[in-house]
Amino acid sequence: MKIGISTFVNDDTIDAVTLARAIEERGFDSLSIAEHTHIPASRESAYPMGGELPDMYYRTLDPFVTLAAAAAVTSRIDLVTGIALLIQRDPIITAKEAASIDLISNGRFVFGVGAGWNLEEMRNHGTDPKTRGARLDEQIEAIKALWTEEPAEYHGKYVDFDASYLRPKPVRKPHPPILIGGASPATVRRVIRHDAGWISNPLPVEYLGKFVGEMRDGLGHDLPLAQFGTPVDPEYWRASEELGFDDIALLLPTAPKDESLRLLDEYAAAVATYRG
């Protein structure tokens, strides 16, 4: 099982280049970056973790820019969107951005996607929250077509374009891994529909096992499994590994450079002990 780092890179934290280098130098396997374009000041949607929404959510850097910077200064770690809020994005531009990072990194990009939870944020992008599931399905299908076909076309209710050429194509064939975020029956159905993987939050182990079992049963085979925000808890790591998780990403708090590097040293020591 790979063990990486997940975080929100902000405008007042450790910079993306220093962070990526530090992660690779300490032997971690991946960097997962969260996305929120903005947070509307009107707080209709409750923060899923409870309480006030931390400002790191609206200060986070664009994940594709961040991962491109990381790609340029690393050679080994996977570069993961954890998750890209696809229903707030243009699928053609996103297909190009993602394939560009895959090319720059020589095939190290992993495409974590989802619909998100902030209804006001979706609406500001012109997305009706009632349509987010159907829109996400179409966007995943359209991006896969743009990555694998030439020319590619797609005709859906929310995504519609005629035969088009798009380069670059991803390095990894047929395309980078697609990991779908969420924790609901709809998530299970979506993973099965797209023959995709799952990127989860650090749910209790019994819930992880329930979702993984349903996905495997529906697919009829194993699937890629990753996490964003994994706690620094070796017992939880062991349980995740036993369930078949391929990549867990320890949550690095949003902090300045010196504090971030100190924490990465602590995490690296814990991983070394875990691995024996």
Image (cartoon, rainbow, N blue to C red):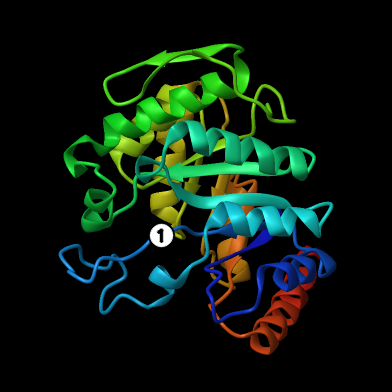
Work out which quarter of the rendered image holds the C terminus and state it. bottom right
The x, y position of residue 260, in whole percent, is: 65, 82
Label 1 crowd (10 A; few <14 / some 14-19 / many >=20): many
Residue at image point 34% right, 51% down = 116
Q: Quadrant of residue 38?
A: bottom left
Query: Which amino acid lies under the numbered mark 1 shown in the image of this protein?
Result: His
The x, y position of residue 42, in whole percent, is: 17, 69
Compare residues 256 and 150 and report the one nearer the observer: 150
The x, y position of residue 39, in whole percent, is: 31, 66
| Secondary element at image label 1 | loop
Does residue 98 sit above or below 155 in this rendering?
below
The x, y position of residue 58, in whole percent, is: 39, 69
Does residue 83 sit above or below 215 in this rendering?
below
Residue at image point 74% right, 73% down = 18
Residue at image point 70% right, 71% down = 19
Number of numbered tags placed on the structure image: 1
Q: Does residue 149 show up?
A: yes
Q: Residue furthest bottom?
A: 258
Does residue 140 sit above or below 102 in this rendering?
above
Q: Quadrant of residue 114?
A: top left
Q: Does residue 1 show up?
A: no
Q: Which residue is mark 1?
A: 36
Q: Quadrant of residue 44?
A: bottom left
Residue 120 placement, left or right of 271: left
Residue 204 placement, left or right of 120: right
Residue at image point 36% right, 45% down = 88
